[in-house]
Image (cartoon, coloured by chain):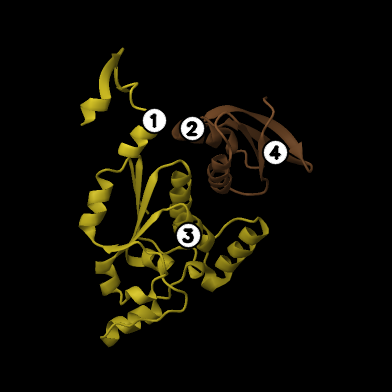
Chain colours: A yellow, B brown
Amino acid sequence: MFNERCSLIDVGAIMTTAVAPSKTLAALQETKPEKVTIVLLSGELDRAMAAFIIATGAAAMGMRVTIFFTFWGLNAIRRTGAGSSARDWLRRMFGLLNKGGAERLPLSRFHFGGLGTSMIHTVMKQNRMPGVPELLRTAQDLGVQLIACTTTMGLMGISKETLIDGVDQLAGVSTYLAEARQGNVNLFI
Amino acid sequence: MPKADVTLDTLGLFCPIPIINTSKKIRELTVGEVLEVLSSDEGIKKDMPAWCETTGHEFVGVEDDTINYQPAYRAFVRKRKS
């Protein structure tokens, strides 16, 4: 299939691919779009922002983007203030202590019991910089696929009812790998 | 620089918003028309050519300017595909 539309040409020492002129760029992108997969393991404001800025930027460049949320990263797609509906009390406690919500993520450094993070929020607001909730909405608008990892959801007492609307899939490692192996850019944040 | 058919104001907005808004705005143009993007983010000078290269639109150029006493940039993109 690859050979049908591309041929290898030798330019000096560098091998490069040339697209057959019969195929337009649009058609090529249709058949083999560039793909970005991001694993968001961290639940901090700064790391989540980096993930969403890359995701939205890539989507704006016409790339297909998937973000996998696992462990603390799940907090970015949990409803604010939602508790846990896990059956055993240990996981229920864990789900309650580990507060979720895109607007509540702490800074990875200088959180200072919330003081540092609220200062950053103020600076961001003054500079009209989008925060994690806005970036998340933008990502959804641009068609970024959001996938929540079921294993860590179970482990951390996070039920699917407590996730925000618009999470595309609940899946595991095979789904991630199936996407990532076609990806041109794979990031772990 | 060519005369812009449509101007998009992203002054005061940070990466990646100018690029996201550009990708939305370009849909409203017809092929061959020129979009002018106003930005106060210096990164636009590199980001706009990179966006054009990836999406297949033509990067016409970028001009340094001063808008409301602040350094600003005018990036010009010609729509190349619908």
Quadrant assignment, res A40: bottom left
Q: Secondary structure at mark 3?
A: helix
Name the residue nearer the viewer: B33 or A164: B33
How many numbered dots are placed on residues in this image? 4
Tell me the mark number nearer the camera, choosing from 1 and 3. Answer: 1
Mark 1 lies on a secondary structure that is helix
Does residue B66 sit above or below A94 in this rendering?
A: above
Asked if both marks, 4 and 2, belong to the same chain, the answer given is yes
From the viewer's side, name the closer residue of B7 and A49. B7
Label ID, residue B71: none
- Front in this rendered view, residue A66 or B24: B24
Q: Secondary structure at mark 4?
A: strand
Pick whichever of labels 4 and 2 is earlier in the sequence: 4
| Marked residue chain, label 4 | B
Disc 3 residue crowd, few under 14, some 14–19, many 20+, Cα 10 Å: many
Chain letter of the residue carrying label 3: A
Circle 2 residues within 10 Å: few <14, some 14–19, many ≥20: some
Q: Mark 1 highlights which residue?
A: A25
| Residue occupied by mark 3 | A136
Q: Which residue is mark 2?
A: B81
